[in-house]
Amino acid sequence: MTDIYSQQRRNRRLTIVLIAAFFIILGILGFAIDSYTFGTLKTTGLPVATLIAVSLAGINGFAAYFYGDNVVLFSLRAQPLQFENPLHKKLHNVVTEMALASGLPMPKIYVIPDPAPNAFATGRDPQHAVVGVTEGLLETMNREELQAVIAHEMGHIKNQDILLMTVVTVLVGTIVLLSDWALRAWRYGGIRTRRGSKSKGMHPVMLLIIVLFALLAPLLSRIIAMTVSRQREYLADASSSEFTRNPLSLASALEKIAGASSPVKNAHKGTAHLFISDPLQRKLDNKEGLFADVMSTHPPIEKRIERLRRMAYIYERTT
Amino acid sequence: MFGWVFLGILVILIIWVIGMYNNMVTLQNQVQNGWQQIDVQLKRRHDLIPNLLNTVKGAMEFERETLSRVIEARARAVGAQTVSGKGEAENMLTQALGRLFALVENYPDLKSNQNILQFQEELTSTENRIGFARQFYNDIVAQFNIKRGVFPSNIIAALFGFKAGEYFQTEEAAKEVPKVDLSLK
């Protein structure tokens, strides 16, 4: 049984572990460069590369914590609300209602110009929270369904999922960037040696680092899935019905989201776990079993709907 | 030796009393804060009504009775002082507004009026806000009253004279939190 408080504790612990792991990975990397490649450790006694790598990790961790929401909003091309638009006005009203229902402060609201219905939450804590929805969501949902989706996001804020999910986004994004760069360097280096230019090919340690990063990339989606986990989505669904007292409206909202055919354009592997329903519509989400449980960021939508229906049934019988 | 043990127990007891007292004060503040949230929304509704009436007045001349009932209910709601009195007055206002909007359906040009639609959205949202603020308030009041009633925190409540929180009642039966199933199976 997971309750809100154990979930909050777990989230804080995982955030610290994640940032520590990030420091260690970059620290080892810097140390490897120091000890073998440049030999600065022997000549000057200063581990220059290690210091650079660790301070890079520090800057990155700092940015993830304080500006993670901005990074997410920028990468999703999210826009602030326009109050002349009646749909945006309605969204603002609905978010206000759900802030009252959850007892949380009013979050900032953003809209993604994309026809695929979806929603996400990001930020650091309830005082610095952001809720974002796509234009498609505003157009396809009725008032109660919109309420349920927003309530789900408020659930993520209340359970303090948002900090962890945002830090995961930024740190993993950084490593993906580095590994991308490493792979490109590998290819570039390979071409150079084949051409038989003056350079004697790549330094073995650089090669090792590049291979390490190339191996890291496929592991990352697994790390995201493990820290994010399906349980989190179920818990936010439960919070949503606690706030709206209406599990069936979330069920019908999820049905509409599942029925929409197109994925969200600007979403990618790094930000997919932030959304209420997988914006990439990956096949793995619909599978069950241990492998899917560990590897997937979202539970099967039918399972979620089934649970909400059961919740509504129990609720009917107790009132 | 005995003196030290006694002193130790006394210190622990004092720390416990302080912790429990602070806990109850925090909850009591949340109750007050929750009530203020409801009050803000009630006021918002009272402020919306005159503008709404001005918009529909011309077209709905023949619905004098309904209009005056809304005005009357609003005046009573504005004047209400106690929690239970407010609950009652707001119920009357909700009913009067419901009747008004049911009548608007009979006037095609009003129904499609952009201003009316906007008012309807604002009033719907305000009603929802009142409802959700009330739901949150009542949940907190329940939490506070339970703490006030059960042992051992009831000793602290009696000692410092914490008064029980008053529920904000409305027509529809108070909704309960749905039971939640979180097992992964």
Image (cartoon, rainbow, N blue to C red):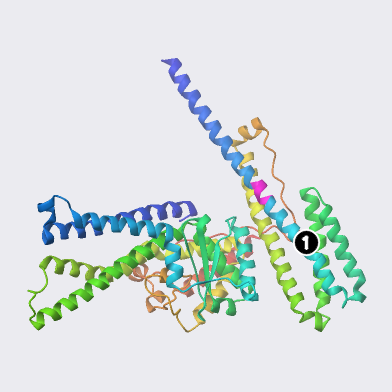
Of A121 and A199, nearer the camera is: A199
| In this rendering, position of residue A39 left or right of residue B182 | left
Name the quarter where the N terminus of chain A is drawn.
bottom left
Q: Is residue A125 in view? A: yes
| In this rendering, position of residue A240 left or right of residue A36 | right
* Mark 1 surroundings: few (<14), some (14-19) or many (≥20) residues within 10 A: few
Above/below status of B103 relative to B8 = below
* Amino acid type indicated by mark 1: Asp
Above/below status of A135 relative to B31 = below
| In this rendering, position of residue B18 left or right of residue A207 | right
Where does the magenta region start and end? B31-35
Q: Is residue A274 in view? A: no
Expressed as whole percent of the image width and height from the top left, the position of residue B7 reads 47, 20
Task: Determine which quarter of the picture holds residue B52.
Answer: bottom right
The residue at 38%/59% (across/down) is: A63
Which chain is disc 1 placed on?
Answer: B
Of A50 and B34, nearer the camera is: A50
The residue at 77%/80% (across/down) is: B113
Query: What residue sits right under mark 1 in the picture?
Result: B47
Expressed as whole percent of the image width and height from the top left, the position of residue B132 reads 66, 60
Type of secondary structure dominating the magenta stretch: helix
Task: Determine which quarter of the picture holds residue A48.
Answer: bottom left
